[in-house]
Image (spheres, grey):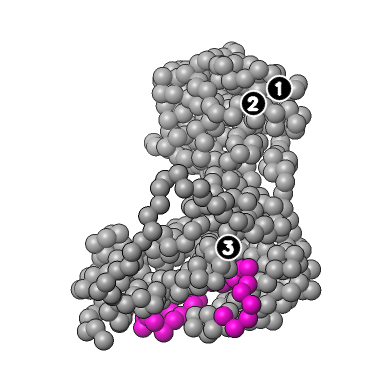
């Protein structure tokens, strides 16, 4: 048995030090360092390996050895399968994070039930709720007849023992990783050490048994997956389930995926009977449009391989403040500052004495620079007090020189716009030809857009 030494672990970033201090040297957070008694080598115990003097010989392969295609377990919930890259990979571990109450347990119970209905063995372990609560939820979802094996347990050893007793499941759901505890680590439940050791044991189980393991993780107030970032590094895929609690739609995104893309978006709507898949999200995001008021522009965006139309709303109002307000929801605030600076410097549009509010409708977050042109259109429209034509979409990147730059997937964006009844599109030069009734009109300079929207401004 190795000598025990005091260990101090930052609960925020997982950094280990030998002395306590008020501030974590590693992540700079205050009051996050907690003493955790631990055996000398938790990792070695968790992986079941102890140090060995002699190694074994590996079989080395060439780079062009044929790789077998990773088999997939399609869950039957298309939006979920899209984000995972075509279904769950056997033997893989997936972490799903999200705010409390956003619908993680609902989503995973639906995934579990749908998979069980296709004849696969599925085990759902909850450490958060009593079995009766999960059963009630299943009834509400109309899934109470599905053959999901359910247990309420928090001890990792007991869970693993139970899992190894029956036939190997195709999927194990653990809700949530923060509630688990293992005797491998001597720290109290919920600490970084416990979470890490528990995750390690379950991931090892996934690899050995070939079951796909989904771990639910809580998110802290600043949007980080609580506890150790290390769990994110340990699993094969990290998904986040997000949404504005005041809206019904919920978005599933991948931020890491060893077996697939990370830019796909799954869209769901929370209803009285659980989550409903939304296969045409543009219709949903444009659902509550008010076409007559100035300051609203429709952005033809892309989320992964799927075009997504969404409304960008701006409000530009004279300010009495020395430093006017700038508030942004769903877009990057430094990107907004850049568009504002270009409008002022290159288009002679005075905005510095105005408060500016910008919001992406429906609680969606846009990361694409292609939204620049739609944002600019919304700002110009609100500043001039002139509503934009309701049946026109916008996309294009704006450079600091005031030029409008081409963006990828122009034809996909135009097709989606045409499909939803839009008749025109304001696009960068050389974007694409007209698409099925959606006539394109090119703008080379942002100042051209200003003249077009407000010819007398
Ligand atoms: P839940 O899955 O418990 O969230 P999480 O596991 O992420 O904490 O979902 C909680 C919310 O979803 C709760 O506010 C109620 C709502 N909900 C519905 O609107 N319809 C439903 O059918 C279900 C099961 C939940
Ligand atoms: Mg839950």
Query: Cα distance, mark 1 to mark 3?
Result: 42 Å
Residue 435: mark in rendering = 1
- Residue 4 x/y as whole percent: 24, 83
Q: Which residues are magenta?
A: 164-189
Q: Residues within 10 Å of mark 3 (few under 14, many from 20)?
A: many
Q: Which residue is labeled 3 in the image? A: 90
Q: Which residue is labeled 2 in the image? A: 411
Q: Residue visible at 67% across and 63% down?
A: 111
Give above or below for 237 relative to 413: below
Note whether ligand 1 is within 8 Å of mark 1. no
Q: Residue visible at 62% across and 56% down?
A: 72
In the foreground, 58 or 171:
58
Q: Quick check: 365 left or right of 187?
A: right
Is residue 453 visible in the rendered image? The answer is no
Of label 1 and label 2, which has the lower sequence position? 2
Q: Quick check: 111 left or right of 22?
A: right
Quadrant in which residue 186 is drawn = bottom left
Query: Cα distance, mark 1 to mark 2?
Result: 7 Å
Are dots 1 and 2 in contact, CB under 8 Å?
Answer: yes
């Amino acid at each position: 048995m190795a000598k025990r030494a005091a260990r101090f672990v930052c609960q925020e970033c997982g950094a280990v030090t030998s002395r306590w201090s008020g501030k974590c040297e590693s992540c700079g957070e205050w009051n996050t360092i907690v003493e955790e008694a631990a055996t000398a080598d938790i990792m070695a115990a968790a992986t079941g390996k102890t140090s060995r003097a002699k190694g074994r010989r590996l079989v080395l392969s060439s780079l062009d050895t044929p790789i077998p295609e990773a088999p997939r377990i399609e869950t039957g919930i298309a939006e979920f399968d899209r984000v995972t890259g075509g279904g769950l990979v056997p033997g893989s571990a997936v972490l799903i994070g999200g705010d409390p109450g956003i619908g993680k347990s609902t989503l995973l119970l639906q995934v579990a039930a749908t998979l069980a209905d296709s004849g696969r063995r599925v085990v759902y372990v909850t450490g958060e709720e009593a079995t009766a609560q999960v059963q009630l939820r299943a009834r509400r979802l109309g899934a109470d007849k599905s053959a999901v094996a359910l247990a309420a347990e928090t001890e990792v050893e007991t869970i693993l023992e139970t899992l190894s007793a029956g036939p190997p499941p195709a999927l194990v759901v653990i809700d949530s990783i923060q509630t688990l505890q293992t005797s491998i680590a001597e720290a109290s439940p919920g600490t970084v050490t416990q979470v890490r050791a528990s995750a390690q044991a379950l991931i090892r189980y996934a690899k050995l048994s070939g079951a796909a393991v989904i771990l639910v993780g809580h998110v802290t107030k600043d949007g980080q997956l609580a506890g150790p970032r290390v769990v994110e590094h340990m699993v094969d895929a990290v998904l986040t389930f997000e949404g504005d609690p005041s809206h019904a739609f919920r978005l599933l995104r991948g931020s890491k995926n060893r077996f697939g893309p990370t830019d796909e978006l799954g869209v769901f709507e929370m209803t009285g009977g659980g989550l409903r898949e939304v296969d045409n999200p543009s219709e949903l995001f444009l659902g509550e449009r008010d076409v007559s008021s100035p300051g609203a522009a429709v952005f033809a965006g892309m989320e992964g391989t799927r075009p997504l139309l969404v409304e960008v709303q701006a409000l530009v109002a004279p300010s009495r403040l020395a430093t006017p307000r700038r508030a942004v929801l769903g877009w990057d605030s430094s990107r907004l500052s850049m568009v504002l600076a270009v409008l002022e410097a290159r288009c002679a549009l005075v905005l510095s004495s105005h408060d500016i509010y910008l919001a992406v409708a429906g609680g969606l977050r846009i990361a694409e620079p292609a939204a620049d042109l739609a944002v600019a259109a919304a700002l110009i429209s609100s500043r001039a007090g002139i509503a934009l034509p309701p049946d026109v979409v916008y996309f294009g990147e704006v450079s600091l020189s005031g030029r409008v730059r081409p963006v990828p997937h122009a034809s996909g964006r135009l097709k989606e716009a045409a499909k939803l009844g839009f008749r025109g599109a304001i696009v960068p030069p050389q974007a694409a030809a007209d698409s099925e009734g959606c006539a394109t009109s090119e703008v080379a300079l942002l100042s051209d857009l200003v003249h077009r929207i407000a010819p007398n401004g």
